[in-house]
Image (tube, rainbow, N blue to C red):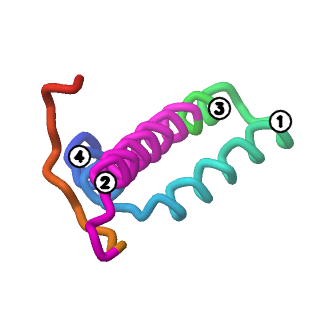
């Protein structure tokens, strides 16, 4: 039953804004560094932190892709250009 809850939580977590995921990750790191937690709790926090770090990395990769797609037109306005996958 807890697997079903975790699946729902992971879907909800992937929709977290970058800033919120980063704040949660910072809080986890701070807790792990400052408190003497039982091993089981440390492992659970580590797993959650790993999941949040992955979310942050994915969001940063999406943002980087969007930035790379921006180009200026003749009037100096920024617009999104189509992604050219042949460059990679």
Q: Which is more N-terminal, label 4 or label 2?
A: 4
Element carrying mark 3 = helix
Q: CA distance from mark 4 to mark 3?
A: 21 Å
Q: Which is more N-terminal, label 1 or label 4?
A: 4
For residue 74, which quarter of the picture?
bottom left
Decide: is 42 above or below 82.
Answer: above
Q: Is residue 59 magenta?
A: yes
Q: Is residue 83 magenta?
A: no
Q: CA distance from mark 2 to mark 3?
A: 36 Å
Q: Which residues are magenta?
A: 46-75
Which residue in the structure is indicated by mark 4? 7
Q: Which is more N-terminal, label 3 or label 2?
A: 3
The label on residue 66 is: 2
Do the CB atoms of the residues marked 1 and 2 lie less than 8 Å apart?
Answer: no
Residue 45 in the image: state x and y as whole percent. 58, 38
The label on residue 42 is: 3
State the quadrant of the N terminus.
top left
Front-most of residues 73 and 80: 73
Q: CA distance from mark 4 to mark 1?
A: 29 Å
Which residue in the structure is indicated by mark 1? 36
């Amino acid at each position: 039953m807890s697997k079903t809850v975790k699946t729902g939580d992971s879907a909800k977590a992937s929709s977290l804004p970058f800033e919120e995921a980063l704040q949660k990750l910072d809080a986890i790191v701070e807790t792990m560094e400052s408190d003497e937690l039982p091993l089981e709790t440390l492992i659970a926090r580590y797993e959650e932190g790993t999941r949040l770090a992955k979310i942050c990395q994915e969001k940063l990769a999406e943002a980087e892709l969007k930035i790379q797609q921006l180009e200026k037109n003749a009037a100096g306005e920024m617009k999104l250009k189509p992604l050219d996958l042949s460059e990679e």
